[in-house]
Amino acid sequence: MASANDVKQMELEGSLKAFKFPEILQFLAMGRMSGVLSVERDHHKVDLTFVEGKITGAQSDTRHLRLGQMLLYAGKLNRATLDEALDAQQIGGRGRRLGEILVDRKIISAEELHGFVRLQVEEEVWDLFRWEDGNFHFEQGPAAKPGAISIALDVEPLLLEGARRLDEWQSICANIDNSREIFRVNPEFQFNPELKLEPKSWRVLSIVNGRLSVEGLVRLSTIGRFETYWALDSLLREGVIASVDDCDGDAGQNGTSHSGVAPVRAVETLVSDAESDAQNDDAKSSLFGIFSRRKPVEGVTSEDDEIDIGSFAGPSAKPYFTDVGLVCSAINNLVEALIGLPGFNDESEKGDWLVTVWTEFEECNPRADLVTYRGGRFRWTRFDAAVNAEGGLAHSIEGARDDSLNALRLVLEHLRTRAADRLGEEKATAIFKKVMNPYDGCEVTTVHPDFSFRRWREDEV
């Protein structure tokens, strides 16, 4: 690597095996460089913007903390407000950032936005400290004009904090080595009045519910990955929480949702009865057995052959209790129609691939934990039970509803893309119309006043 005096005349690139990430940061800071540092490995790329040796921005294709979600989970806005701001951003073109729109509309203050943007950038930097391989490239350029909200992080404090965190990560990862592990409050924990927990530990403890994975807790806590892991580690060491695998019984059965709804006996009975019926249905056939009973469906054809999408029940004759239940039912029938079609499944795929898909989308929408996927079907009994306990779509349920519909939207997009890639666009379109259209006229007894199934599927997919 060249000296700081020579760096202004050249571009820098190399391997993280030869030059560690902290060394690169220090080098750019000493040279008071302006430009973009790109770090990449395994198709994961992070861009850090520098202005005169200070970090002023970060972009990532796999960012786990997105501004809109952070503001949602911090209670700074609701989904409807966020959607309106995102629509305004699309209308206004690429020039306007989401945060600037929210500040202009006085939804959040500039100071609040600055804190969230700073956390976003710091999180990208902390993740890069843990990379041991990959490639980097620094492209010099003029100092970018600051936006309405600008940050400038000094590198030296980041280096000191990064070194400290790396040391602690080794100890934490020895205790928590699986991002999909699920914790609950330890049923054997006995309160000790001398126990002192830090505010961040209380924050994480408040959202531990026996259903959220570690990754889901990271997104919902809005305090960052390291701080969330640190809090979980301290709670584990104090015996306050325990892995659901170490607890007897169904950990998720009695835990409260982070929506704030505490289950009562009537709700537990509703969930138990509904899930018992579902389990009995599952026992009648294997996972793919229920998808393999097939008969031709009239009206679904292509230029080449008739598309057999199997025998499926279609919409319920009775009104659905919630819009989440309606959407789950529609997706279940879509999966049933697609799963047995030649070419839709890859013989190399083992087990139920939708488990992995749902896990990924649920982790991105952690308040969707009242919807579950098992036995080859999406189940919404917990969500309906929570709504029933609240006497309707109360404010405490809105977050769970928003995340559930958003995660299910991602599932629908995934199915649509997979069907088009493997069956062809024409067949995929015909199948989707045949299965989804009957749900447009379904009634819902407890529904958000703005919800329309047709608009939901046409706007989002």
Image (spheres, rainbow, N blue to C red):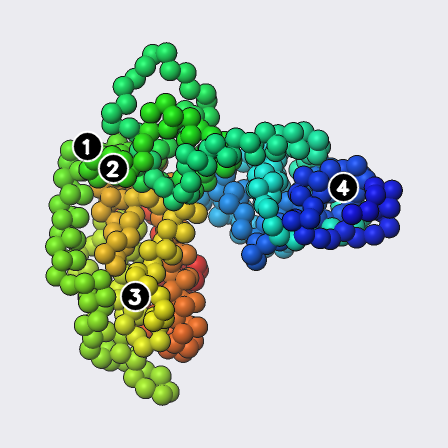
Residue 303 locus on image (x, y percent): 37, 87
User: Of the residues shown, which amino acid type is indicated by label 3?
Assistant: Leu
Which is nearer the N-term, disc 2 or disc 1? 2
Residue placed under numbered mark 2 in the picture: 251
Residue 13 locus on image (x, y percent): 73, 53
Residue placed under numbered mark 4 in the picture: 28
Residue placed under numbered mark 1 in the picture: 264
User: Of the residues shown, which amino acid type is indicated by label 2?
Assistant: Ala
Near mark 3 (Cα within 10 A), the count class, few <14, some 14-19 or many ≥20, is: many
User: Of the residues shown, which amino acid type is indicated by label 4?
Assistant: Leu
Relative placement, left or right, of 3 versus 41 is right
CA separation, marks 2 and 1?
16 Å
Nearer the camera: disc 3 or disc 2: 2
CA separation, marks 3 and 4?
53 Å
- Which picture quadrant has residue 151? top right
- Per the image, label 3 sits on a secondary structure element best described as helix
Near mark 2 (Cα within 10 A), the count class, few <14, some 14-19 or many ≥20, is: many
Nearer the camera: disc 2 or disc 1: 2
Disc assigned to residue 334: 3
Residue 22 locus on image (x, y percent): 67, 39
